[in-house]
Amino acid sequence: MKIDFEITDQYNENKVLHVLKNQMKLSGRLIKKLKATGGILLNEKPVRTVDTVKKDDILSVIIDFNEQVDIKPEAAEFSIIYEDDCFLAVDKKPGIPVHPTAGHPTGTLAHQVLAHFINQGLSIKVRPINRLDKDTSGIILFAKNSHMQDQIINQMKENRVYKAYLGIVHGVFNPLEGIINLPIARKSDSIMERIIDPAGAPSITRYKTLEHHKELSLVKFVLETGRTHQIRVHCRAMGHPLLGDWLYSDIQTGLIERQALHSHILAFDHPLNGQRIELMAPLPVDMKNALAVQQS
């Protein structure tokens, strides 16, 4: 991937290194790699980071590394929502882990995405930017290089990435729309479970009830923070746990075989051109079926 930057009056007579770090927002680690591979160009010619630039020059970087990966590709079909030279967005099915763990060393979305990259002739690592629980469905965004990953992570820190989920909960929120602002911490005797704790990390979820069917509601959740299990914990705390949530609900159901939570919308500013990218994954079949039973 090639990134070009036209030098403006603001950066006239600046060092190449200054422009790379301050305008193009490249990390020191990436700049070091680019120097080693000859991937820094000024007007299409190799340049040193100590050299100066002038107005109307074109400073370019070529991010094209052969990276070592520590997992094996596993070819499988998955739904691609969006793809360009920088990103891949996938609509993850429920029941598939995003990345390998001790309990799931194979059969993950990362293995499948690696096979997809290899088929494209790419030798790159799999870099998921957002993460979903194994049984949560919906949008997962992958970066095709470390620079794009860093850029979106920085947008997340600045609260510029919009993340909306759809969930089916027991009962009806009162009021139908509002903000849940309750701190979350890890339960002391568990490596997985989270609880509401005054000493926990600040955690804010906006919610809006979209539909109500008998004992269940379809709710849109928008995350302002990104704590582990945030929506699941907040729903339990409000007395309206997610349908099928085996960890945070004691209510048994035969309507669905996992927590009814889906990553529905993800929006961010594309680092190359500033364009707002909005990705959407439709409500999955199992959640539609659960609602349909309540409607009948």
Image (spheres, helix red, strand yellow):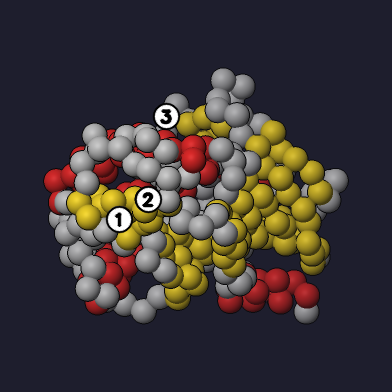
Q: On the image, which quarter does residue 45 sit in?
A: bottom left
Label 1 environment density (alpha carbons within 10 Å; few <14, some 14–19, many ≥20): some
| Residue lying at 49% horizontally and 37% vertically, measured from the top left | 10
Kind of residue sitting beneath label 1 = Asn
- Specify whether residue 29 is in view: no
Q: Is the residue under label 2 in contact with that under label 1 (CB below 8 Å)?
A: yes
Residue pointed to by mark 2: 57
Disc nearest the viewer among 3 and 2: 2
Residue at (65%, 60%) from the top-left corner?
166
The amino acid at mark 3 is Asp
User: What is the distance, in whole Å, between disc 3 and disc 2 at their CAs?
Assistant: 59 Å
Judged from the image, the secondary structure of the residue bearing numbered disc 2 is loop
Q: Which residue lies under the disc numbered 3?
A: 189
Residue 248's x, y, as percent? Answer: 57, 46
Residue farthest to the right, as pictured: 175
Q: Earlier in the sequence, mark 1 or mark 2?
A: 1
